[in-house]
Amino acid sequence: MSNLSCQRIMVAIDGSEARHAAANYASRLARKLSATLIVVGVIDATVGTDPQDLTGSSELIELIDQRVQDEVNEIVEEARQVGVAEVERQIVVGDPRAVIVQAVLDHEADLLVIGSRRCSAIQHLLTGSLTEYLVEHAPSPVLIVRSDQDPDQWDREFTPYVAMGR
């Protein structure tokens, strides 16, 4: 078996409720492993948008971009407060499936941390689960953090479930 390394941990945030738990866990893990934390804010450009509908809606795009940038900056600051020495950031726009996988490749992340998102049965049937897609297609292991997990327990025990993609 080759050397197992976890020096670059990426957390992808998309505005879902689970983003806080994922970012918190990724920050604590990066601190414990003295790893670089890469915070990627994802702007989903596929949600009910036709590119032609976006013409003239630059204010809406700027508002969404600013909200995501604010969230990323907040997570970066929180990571530094818990002792993460190296933190990188990026905002990506597009289909979350594609842009997250590409960000993992671009940043050479050893681990991708995401929050477990709940979607309706109909949404899951129509679009599938982002989590499932990332587990299958991300070039690195994927750690899924449930939003109902107690962050205080994370410092006492380290038993993550890491789903290995193909």
Image (spheres, grey):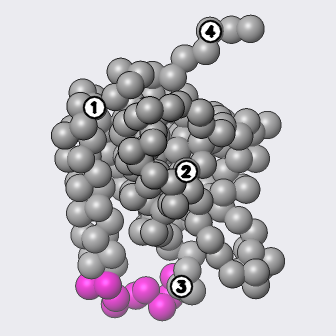
* Mark in the foreground, 4 or 2: 2
User: In terms of sequence position, does the residue under pointer 1 or pointer 4 come before the other?
Assistant: 4
* Mark in the foreground, 4 or 3: 4
Find numbered disc 2 in the image and state the secondary structure of the residue it sits on. Answer: strand
Say whether residue 38 is magenta: no
User: Which residue in the structure is indicated by mark 3?
Assistant: 49
Any part of residue 36 in sight:
no
User: In terms of sequence position, does the residue under pointer 1 or pointer 3 come before the other?
Assistant: 3
- Which residue: 79% across, 37% down? 166
* Mark in the foreground, 3 or 2: 2
- Which residue: 66% across, 57% down? 131
The three-letter code of the residue at mark 2 reads Val
Q: Callout 1: 10 Å neighbours few (<14), some, many (20+)?
A: many
Q: Callout 2: 10 Å neighbours few (<14), some, many (20+)?
A: many
Q: Are marks 1 and 4 in contact (CB under 8 Å)?
A: no
Q: Which residues are magenta?
A: 51-60
User: In terms of sequence position, does the residue under pointer 4 or pointer 3 come before the other?
Assistant: 4
* Mark in the foreground, 1 or 3: 1
| Labelled disc at residue 84 | 1
User: In terms of sequence position, does the residue under pointer 2 or pointer 1 come before the other?
Assistant: 1
Q: Callout 3: 10 Å neighbours few (<14), some, many (20+)?
A: few
How many angstroms separate mark 1 from mark 3 (CA)?
A: 37 Å
Along the line of sight, the residue nearer the viewer: 90 or 132: 132
User: Which residue in the structure is indicated by mark 2?
Assistant: 145
| Labelled disc at residue 58 | none
- Dominant SS in magenta: helix
The three-letter code of the residue at mark 3 reads Thr
